[in-house]
Amino acid sequence: MTYASLINLAAEEKSAEVTNWGGRIGWLVGLALFVALVYWLMRQGWQWRGRLQADLPDLPTAPETPGEAKLKLSGRYHGSTTAGQWLDRIVAHGLGVRSKAELTLTDAGLDVVRPGADDFFVPAAQLREARLDKGIAGKVLTEGGLLVVTWSHGDKLIDSGFRSDRAEQHPAWVEAINSMITTNTTEGAAR
């Protein structure tokens, strides 16, 4: 091949297009629509679950004078489930919303204050059990890393999961709540 034929050959060939912008934009729009669809379906599922649990009565509020605080805890609320079924999340009345939480245990019951979410109160007569566990509502921690309080509301038993900022507080809470339940049961039987 001569030098002139190489120059003619180089002049005739064109470089391949580096970026196909139309194809890329199409893929990005398709991906965005798919993500939007997934989020919409998740929201629909959450609302459907809320409608299924609409028979759950309104949550009690704390009494004006709950009494002296036995224990206080600052930490996280990880959600509530049907008792014994750690993946059956309860979303009615805001119980499915994870949030920061301030717990106060008094003779009247357990007061749960949640900034940014609905507060609730569990009267002492409705407390059923407290235990240490490792998971609730899709949240899994180390063994004993979660304080789970079982309580009755309406005709349903509910497990609510809390994690203290200082996990060494959990055993004291379990002991205090269970002793309070035993005392209430003994007093109720004596009446």
Image (tube, grey):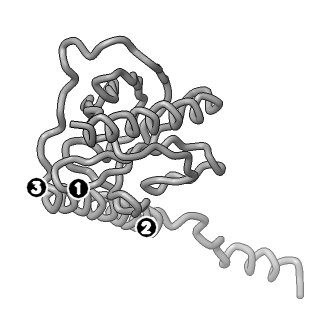
Q: Are marks 2 and 1 in contact (CB under 8 Å)?
A: no
Label 2 to label 1, Cα distance in Å?
47 Å
- Crowdedness near tag 3: few (<14), some (14–19) or many (≥20) residues, C-alpha within 10 Å: few
Q: Front-most of 112 and 49?
A: 112
The residue singled out by tag 1 in the image is: 156
The CA span between labels 3 and 2 is 44 Å
* Residue that numbered label 3 is attached to: 55
Q: Quadrant of residue 50 in the image?
A: bottom left
Type of amino acid at the residue the image marks with label 2: Trp
Q: Is residue 175 left or right of residue 2?
A: left
Query: Taking 9 as reference, is 135 above or below it?
Result: above
SS under mark 1: strand
Residue placed at 33% from the left, 22% from the top?
A: 107
Residue at x 18% of width, y 27% of height: 61
Q: Position of residue 63 (x, y in %)?
A: 19, 19
**Label disc, if present, on residue 32 of the rendered structure:** none
**Of discs 2 and 1, which sits in the foreground?**
1
Q: Amino acid at mark 3?
A: Asp
Q: Earlier in the sequence, mark 2 or mark 1?
A: 2
| Residue, disc 2 | 27
- Asked whether the residues under the numbered discs 3 and 1 touch, taking CB atoms below 8 Å apart as contact, a structural biologist would say no
For the residues labelled 3 and 1, the Cα–Cα distance comes to 10 Å
